[in-house]
Image: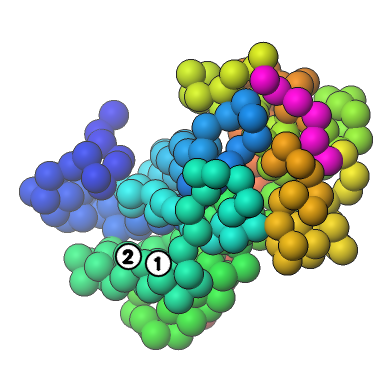
Amino acid sequence: MSKLLLEEMSWPEIREALNNGMKTVIIFAGSVEQHGPHMAEITDTVLGYQSAIDLAKRLGNALVAPVIRPGLSEHHMALPGTITLRPEVFIGVVEDYIAAYVRHGFETIIVASSHGGNFKTVAQIVEDQAKKYKDVKIIGAFSLSDMMSTIAKLEKNDSLPAGACGGHSCAWETSEMLFFAPHLVDMDKAERGFLGEVAGEILQKFFDEGVLSVAQNGILGDARPSNAERGERFFKALQDKQEQVIRENLDKARKGQ
Ligand SMILES: [Zn+2]
């Protein structure tokens, strides 16, 4: 398998890949932020790499950009270790990634989020940059609601207690980390957090007033029913949805040309 991570390739390798038609690049915006008492702050960046690599393999003509860390995490700042970028700094970083890859000859640039707080801003950046670079396809990925509705279905199919997969350091995310990076999870410290529905007013409160207004331990959901096997299955199902949305967006961009 040839290399997919741009940061691990040399410039001649990247030039050769471009010449061989690898003209799509996948940029994930992750985070460095608290992930409950049981899991590492780098979680969204680890999962961003895994999603990007898997997507690159599915698409077949794509390379993976260094995952952007940190992201927009003001709502997690009450707990130590979290870093948040000012929105204008975050937007500038994503725009400069895009500008670099446009200059180097990539023809399709996919921008995705592996952290809830980035989704809205990333969608806006994609919209703006698509207008700026008319000869390049700037493509968005699935939305936070696409992600959360997929997770809700998985939670139900697995007969997990309602709210166990609340979306942050929960049974879904902890399971994925147990599959990909078990050394970054301490299941002895896994706890239950907020178990209500994370939508509407609660989601707004979480973003506006911060995580402690919803859960003192920083968990939305329940981390305890987590295991690697579940992580592998949930990851695959989310990637199926992600791939479907990206292919639809690629089709739309093609027709728009
Ligand atoms: Zn996370």
Q: Position of residue 238 (x, y in %)?
A: 65, 41
**Quarter of the image with the N terminus in it:** top left
Q: Is residue 20 left or right of residue 255?
A: left
- For disc 1, the marked residue is 94
Q: Residue at x 8, y 48 (%)?
A: 12
Please, is residue 225 above or below residue 244 in the view? Answer: above
**Quarter of the image with the C terminus in it:** bottom left
Q: Amino acid at mark 2?
A: Tyr
Q: Amino acid at mark 1?
A: Val
Total marks placed: 2
Q: Position of residue 90 (x, y in %)?
A: 44, 67
Report the colour scheme. Answer: rainbow
- For disc 2, the marked residue is 97
Nearer the observer, 253 or 120 = 120
**SS at circle 2:** helix
Range covered by the magenta-colored residues: 189-194
Q: Magenta stretch mostly in which secondary structure?
A: loop
In magenta segment, residue 193? yes
Q: Position of residue 250 (x, y in %)?
A: 51, 64
Q: Is residue 198 left or right of residue 237?
A: right
In magenta segment, residue 34? no
Nearer the observer, 88 or 4 = 88
Q: Residue at x 48, y 39 (%)?
A: 42
- Asked whether the beta carbons under mark 2 and mark 1 sit within 8 Å of each other, the answer is yes
Give the label on residue 22, or none.
none
Which quadrant would residue 195 be assigned to in this image? top right
Q: Residue at x 51, y 38 (%)?
A: 41
Nearer the observer, 180 or 188 = 188
**SS at circle 1:** helix
Q: Is residue 248 left or right of residue 5?
A: right
Which quadrant would residue 88 be assigned to in this image? bottom left
